[in-house]
Amino acid sequence: MSHIDKLGPGGRNAPESGIIAVVNHGRDKQGLIPLWAGEGDLPTPEFICEPAISALRAGETFYTWNRGIPELRTALGDYHQRHFNRVASPEHHIVTGSGMQAIQLAIQAVSGADDEIVYLSPAWPNFAAALGIAGGRPVAVELDFKNAWSLDLERLARAVTPRTRAIFVNSPSNPTGWTADADTLRQILDIARANDIWVIADETYALFHYRDGRAASFLDVADDGDRVIYANTFSKNWAMTGWRLGWLTIHPSLQQTFENLVQYSTSGVPQFLQKGAVAALEQGDGFITEQVERARRARELVCAALDSTGRAAFEKPEGAFYLFFKINGIDDTQAAAFNIIDEAGVGLAPGTAFGVGGETFFRICFHRRLDQLEQAMDRLCQWIKAR
């Protein structure tokens, strides 16, 4: 009997990420242009790095608040007031070791073994995998694609059963770019209210929205008493993917519960990293604006290039910084993603990694400098035309 056979169900059932599989295949390929991961190519700006470095040199290396330092939780409240016009005291926020941990803690808080959480698919795979590892059952509700992505709210309502504990909503969506308007969020919230279940709102890309300012948020439609947990991250807005910093926005009555969950997982985020996060929130609005405009130009370049092949099908995304697209005549996107690495020197994520409804698509992260994207698209379009 192998070592794996002797593991518990969490270890045995942890799936390999379809994204990481292609990353590992092409990671060391010389000259490859990596567009597979969900991050831009800018390093964290100096105005964020310097306070973290100064705090580290000052010896801020001890245990700290499990829920996050007061200075950072205050800055999070100011951020929500500024961008969402929602008064949020420090007691509404818990600092986590990444947006991924924020989602894990939300899962732990609302569900147990054999409980269901409904989510919209195609989706970033980590949510469903984390729920499965925890013993829960992810229930996919497929978004429709007919030249555009859309949600059938009746299908969503039918997916809720007596075992359902929450609805997980990522808007703007990774990978599709689908973005719910306020009315759609209101109707999702009504389904949750009617069934006495939670909403877990992943609004990571709310500020990466390409029309009318930020995307609609559950903060726009929820009442103070609604059972909504917001999971977020510092990774995308402020080019901090490697910092592994996130946060939860919750009802203040849950503050101690989530502090307990942090204590029994990571016991908190290093204080010197949190000092950098304070600077990101207090000084980073201009940097976010620049990033969004940069991504907007990149979106136009990528969409135009793929459209010129006459073989790509996609919807220009309203939010986030991904294009989820089909190549007519190619159905096995996992095999094709490996071929594109080997033959074109471009790294894409296969749609098979994103679950139900994504199997025949590819995801490209276009949040990179334009000259590199032009080169990548030249290579990719030549590869497509040769097929």
Image (spheres, rainbow, N blue to C red):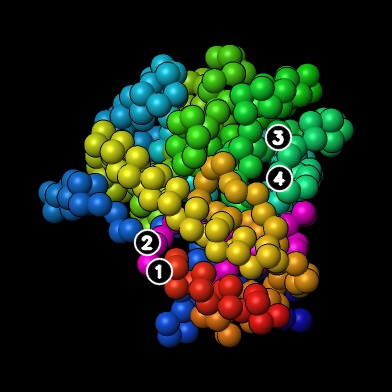
In the image, the segment drawn in magenta is 346-371
Against 335, is 236 above or below? above
Marks 3/2: CA distance? 36 Å
* Residue denoted by label 1: 372
Against 99, is 226 above or below? above
Marks 4/2: CA distance? 27 Å
Label 3 residue SS: strand
* Residue denoted by label 3: 167
First along the sequence among labels 3 and 4: 4
Marks 1/2: CA distance? 6 Å
Label 4 residue SS: loop
* Residue denoted by label 2: 369
Q: Nearer the viewer, residue 146 or 349?
A: 146
Disc 2 residue type? Arg
- The x and y percentages for residue 343 are 58, 85
Left or right, 122 with respect to 173, comes to right
Q: Quadrant of residue 353?
A: bottom right
Proximity of marks 3 and 2: CB atoms separated by less than 8 Å: no
* Residue denoted by label 4: 148
Disc 3 residue type? Ile
Q: Nearer the viewer, residue 77 or 366?
A: 366
User: Residue at coordinates 65% horizontally, 37% vertically from top-left?
Assistant: 169
